[in-house]
């Protein structure tokens, strides 16, 4: 109904007697950021119209008109010929208005039996589901890179650290497979999250359901959802699926941030364990010698941003009464930014990890420092009948001597070693070498090159059958 002062341009303007304040219009609009849901909004509308025709709410002719119109609107958007209007608030009303402009009155029938509340909840789920599938592929690609690198470097020895102090020798392949385990759990979390994303809210309408004889199973089927949701109030208000996704993403970013920290350390002149190809680095405008590991640094930095968005969404939800509240419009920007940021970081890592250049001699040299085989000497004494606590004491003394003399355990003569325990024999040198040390840890999950090779192969096989 139009009147001089009313809000006639708005689909909901009927009961209003004055126009929306210009600032409020801007303030409440979401079209600037939710237009990225256009594809899934149209996908949802096509399924809704198809269902409405099946149950007799629309005629077949009306359905076809609507679907053709929606396809045309989609083509306009994709051709960059769609003018988004802030007056029309959001992606949903923009598309519906354009549909009606194109096909006339029938366009106004599309919204029968639904509300923007169940519509937007459906759109986000459809959109997120597609992004989840892309992200799952990116994780798989990265894991492939990691496992391939691990296989290549199964024999490369480096110092393993605790407290960032040299602890025991490990193989570089083993270290990279530790990264892969983190990503593997992330992948499984994502697959689990997808199950809860893939539930259809459509049919909940504004909050209580609808009086039309809708067939929700049919719409769910058409849209590839596992099933319709079970409670209309929950359907329009719940965003925990998005929170769960952001929690997953925060963990991935936390993992990538840890990897980044290591890459940055390893690429430093002090560690000098790896080289990152120039294409992943930048220089300094003042210090000509610099080659900075920007990609890992940025990934480490972006992890804070993603976790920040997770907290935003948790705070967004925590005080909302049932059912839909406009607060929920604030779910989109954090969610979208998490998706974009995560995809960018996974892409960078997927490209960079296989290109890591390993400086095996430097890693080996570092493992030879810091008494990394001290535990092996203790274990050796235990085998010779010394109690572990006593063995620990003996080796501690030997290390003290080594520090004083500037010698690693493997560099001491038999006589020197025998000062600390008479049970030490010639065979001690088998365990004091780096190879002896890593080869001895030859069990499932251990760092022995043979174990690393079979672990990497198992990972690659698993990835191939995903
Ligand atoms: N733009 C809104 C959102 O993002 C769509 C739903 C609006 N519903 C409403 N009753 N105002 O949540």
Image (cartoon, grey):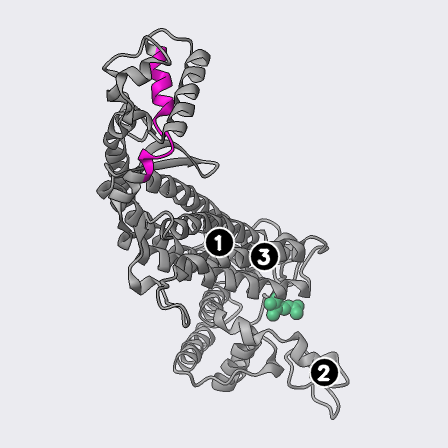
Most foreground residue, 416 or 246:
416
Ligand 1 quadrant? Answer: bottom right
Residue located 73% across and 55% down the image: 321
Q: Which mark is residue 308?
A: 3
State how far apart marks 1 and 2 are (Cα).
Answer: 39 Å
Q: Local crowd at mark 3 within 10 Å, few (<14), some, or many (≥20)? A: some
- Asked if marks 3 and 1 touch (Cβ < 8 Å), the reply is no
Q: Which residues are magenta?
A: 366-382
- Which residue is located at x 64 percent, y 62 percent? 328
Label 1 or label 2, whichever lies nearer to me, is: 2
Identify which residue, 378 or 289, lies in the foreground: 289
- Report x, y in % for residue 303: 50, 55
What is the secondary structure assignment of the residue under circle 1?
helix
Comparing labels 3 and 1, the label whose residue is closer to the camera? 3
Q: Which residue is mark 1?
A: 217
- Identify which residue, 433 or 60, lies in the foreground: 433
Q: Which of disc 3 and disc 2 is earlier in sequence?
A: 2
**In the image: residue 186, left or right of residue 425:** right
């Amino acid at each position: 109904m139009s009147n001089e002062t009313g809000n006639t341009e708005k689909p909901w303007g009927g009961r209003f007697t004055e126009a929306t304040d210009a600032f409020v219009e801007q303030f409440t609009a979401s079209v600037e950021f939710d237009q990225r849901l256009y594809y899934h909004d149209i996908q949802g509308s096509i399924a809704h119209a198809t269902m409405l025709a099946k149950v007799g709410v629309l005629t077949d002719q009306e359905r076809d008109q609507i679907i053709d119109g929606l396809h045309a609107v989609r083509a306009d958007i994709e051709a960059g010929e769609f003018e988004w209007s802030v007056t029309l608030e959001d992606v949903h009303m923009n598309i519906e208005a354009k549909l009606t402009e194109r096909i006339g009155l029938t366009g106004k029938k599309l919204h029968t039996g639904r509300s923007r509340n169940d519509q937007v909840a459906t759109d986000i789920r459809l959109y997120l589901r597609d992004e989840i599938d892309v992200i799952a592929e990116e994780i798989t690609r990265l894991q492939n890179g990691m496992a391939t690198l691990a296989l290549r470097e199964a024999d490369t020895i480096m110092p393993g650290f605790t407290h960032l102090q040299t602890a025991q020798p490990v193989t570089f392949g083993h270290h990279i497979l530790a990264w892969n385990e983190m990503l593997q759990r992330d992948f499984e979390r994502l697959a689990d999250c997808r199950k809860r994303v893939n539930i259809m809210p459509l049919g909940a309408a504004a909050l209580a359901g609808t009086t039309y004889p809708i067939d929700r199973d049919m719409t769910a089927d058409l849209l590839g959802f596992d099933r319709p949701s079970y409670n209309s109030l929950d359907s329009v208000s719940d965003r925990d699926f998005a929170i769960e996704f952001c929690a997953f993403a925060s963990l991935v970013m936390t993992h990538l941030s840890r990897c980044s920290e290591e890459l940055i350390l390893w690429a430093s002149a002090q560690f000098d364990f790896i080289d990152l190809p120039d294409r992943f680095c930048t220089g300094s405008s003042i210090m000509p010698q610099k080659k900075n590991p920007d990609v890992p640094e940025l990934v480490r930095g972006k992890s804070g941003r993603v976790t920040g968005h997770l907290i935003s969404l948790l705070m967004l939800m925590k005080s909302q009464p049932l059912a839909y509240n406009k607060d929920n419009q604030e779910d989109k920007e954090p969610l979208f930014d998490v998706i974009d940021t995560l995809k960018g970081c996974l892409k960078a890592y997927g490209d960079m990890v296989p290109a890591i250049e390993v400086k095996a001699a430097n890693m080996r040299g570092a493992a030879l420092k810091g008494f990394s085989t001290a535990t092996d000497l203790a274990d050796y004494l235990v085998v010779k009948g010394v109690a572990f606590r006593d063995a620990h004491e003996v080796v501690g003394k030997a290390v003290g001597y080594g520090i004083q003399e500037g010698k690693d355990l493997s560099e001491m003569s038999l006589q020197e070693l025998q000062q600390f325990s008479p049970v030490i024999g010639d065979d001690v040198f088998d365990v004091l070498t780096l190879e002896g040390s890593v080869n001895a840890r030859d069990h499932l999950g251990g760092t022995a090159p043979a174990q690393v090779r079979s672990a990497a192969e198992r990972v690659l096989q698993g990835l191939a059958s995903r």
